[in-house]
Image (spheres, grey):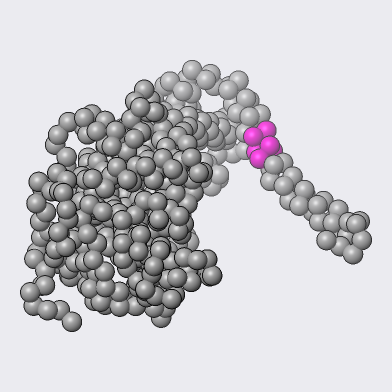
Amino acid sequence: MGSALGQKPWEPLIRLFLLACAVVSIATTAGIILVLVTEAATFFREVSPLEFFFTTSWDPLLRNEFGVLPLICGTLLVAGGALLIAVPMGLGTAILMSEYLPNWMRQIAKPILEILAGIPTVVYGYFALVFITPQIIQRLFPSAAPFNGASAAIVVGIMIIPTIASLCDDSFRAVPNRLREAGYALAATRLEVSTRIVLPASTSGVIAACLLGLGRAIGETMAVSMAAGITPKLTLNPLVPIQTMTSFIVQVRGGDAAQGTTAYRALFAVGLTLFAITLITNLVSHRVLRRFREVYE
Amino acid sequence: MNPPELLPRPTLRVDTNDSSPRPESAPEDAPIRVCDFSLAYGTFQAIKQVSLTIPAREVTAIIGPSGCGKSTLLRSMNRMNDFVSTVRTEGEILYRNVNIYANDCDPVELRRRVGMVFQRPNPFPKSIFKNVAWGARINGYRGNLNELVEESLQKAALWDEVKDKLHQNALTLSGGQQQRLCIARSIALQPEVLLMDEPCSALDPIATSRIEDLIDQLKSQYTVVLVTHNMQQAARVSDRTVFMLMGELVEVDRTSVIFTKPKEQRTQDYISGRFG
């Protein structure tokens, strides 16, 4: 404590500064929501929400068709495929790091893994375009188009492996060692301890990690636009070009739509939809989490 | 170091009719023999050339001041020290004449027969039933799990208290109940030896006395090795007492002898409370 009982003179200033930091991010969020909602409201006065959510053709620039389903479908296809790849690989990596590797190897492996998360997404997009599509997908499926959903899903999956692995590793590490000891003392193997003690005890952390990965996959723009193309199409076929919500937003922002037009405002409607999807995933996962997690105290 | 006749067999075999109590444990009936065993954590020598025989169906207590290596020795008996990466061992520990530190000894197989109960109760954050059934399940138990759980809980003197709430989370139990649950969980694997590492140190006196009664019952079927910092506890429940000091085994004898007329001055000093 200070020399007297009183506060140091700069204490209130520090407090004020920290408050300002917090306010900036809250205000930004509020501002974003405000802009999204007002612009989207204008859009929905011009295009009915029924048309927007329930028709299946998206061509806002040329034919004024505003059925958002192909974009949602594209986003879900890419994000779902990415999770399909990233969750098993991320979990496997995390189990390896926290349960199998000696500590010194983990301390080398983890930063290397985190470097993967720092590679610019354009590089991943290029990687998908010049390697994954021609060298892997088109070899396996010669009919695949140069732009396709599968390559985007794979590359986004690879992108989010470090996020999932690193966060899962942290939550595995938080499981108290006495639970592991209990398992080993009951003649469990390393794999049994990993999958039947550590994994269930860190369900909440694992789900949180997957959600963060999902969030990144849904929000990923650059790599997806480069790999999957910009052809909105309502399909589950991963071998044809598609468009996701985010790649539509960059396409329009890239100058294809003049400010003030309906097509321009469609951007905000799509943004709001994206925001709603993320919000719903979060809410649902909170429910799931509360039901399934094992609390160890 | 390794006399040829002690070379390990590839698998551990225990004669399964072992569970009926025998009137007198013959001196050669010793499930565990520690032979000139040393263990170091990095450069710290925690156990120095200890030799010790653990007779069947008796309670052997290991006492000594903190840091004397008693827990380390106990954990060496089912290779729970494997998880410390800097551990080095010398000498042998034989379980049923198999050197458990031999390369071809599978520690998982060993721990099926040499169970362990820890200092702090550590039930899994699962139901009481699942806690008891867990070990049996992963080890491919084919019998009736309900019966096994009931029998194990009964042997651990916990059945009457939990029979109506088997599917409640184990963490809702009191500390003493949790520790008896952990004992039940170990028993469910039908081990031959139970290692107990200060099982009462986190418990109140009433819970402690229940566990002590339980240990007394358990020795009719199991060989118990008990590490304790509590000399009264060793005197109350054990048949034989081992006194360790700074990694060395100072003296081992019948408990009554250790506590009345020990041969070693250092034992005398410790039990009379002059240090430790």
Residue reaching furthest to the front = B261
Q: Look at the magenta stretch and give its main secondary structure.
A: helix
Q: Is residue A131 above or below residue B49?
A: above
x and y percentages locating residue B99 in the rendered image:
17, 68
Q: Nearer the viewer, residue A151 or A251?
A: A151
Q: Across the whole image, how many numbered discs are drawn on residues? A: 0
x and y percentages locating residue B121 in the rendered image:
42, 46
Q: Is residue A145 above or below residue A74?
A: below
Tell me the residue at 41%/81% (across/down): B43
Q: Does the magenta segment cover residue A32? A: yes
Q: Is residue A51 above or below residue A23?
A: above
x and y percentages locating residue A257 in the rendered image:
55, 39
Q: Is residue A276 visible?
A: yes
Tell me the residue at 10%/60% (across/down): B11
Q: Is residue B185 visible?
A: no
Q: Nearer the viewer, residue B52 or A215?
A: B52
Q: Does the magenta segment cover residue B37? A: no
x and y percentages locating residue A242 in the rendered image:
36, 39
Residues shaded magenta: A29-34
Q: Tell me the quarter of the picture where residue A240 sits.
A: top left
Tell me the residue at 22%/59% (across/down): B55
User: Left or right of A241: which side holds A7?
Assistant: right
Q: Is residue A71 above or below residue A100?
A: above
User: Left or right of B66: which side holds A13?
Assistant: right
User: Left or right of B241: which side holds A215?
Assistant: right
Q: Tell me the quarter of the picture where residue A234 sits.
A: top left
Q: Nearer the viewer, residue A98 or A77?
A: A98
Tell me the residue at 69%/42% (across/down): A26
The N terminus of chain B: image quadrant:
bottom left
Q: Nearer the viewer, residue A215 or B235?
A: B235
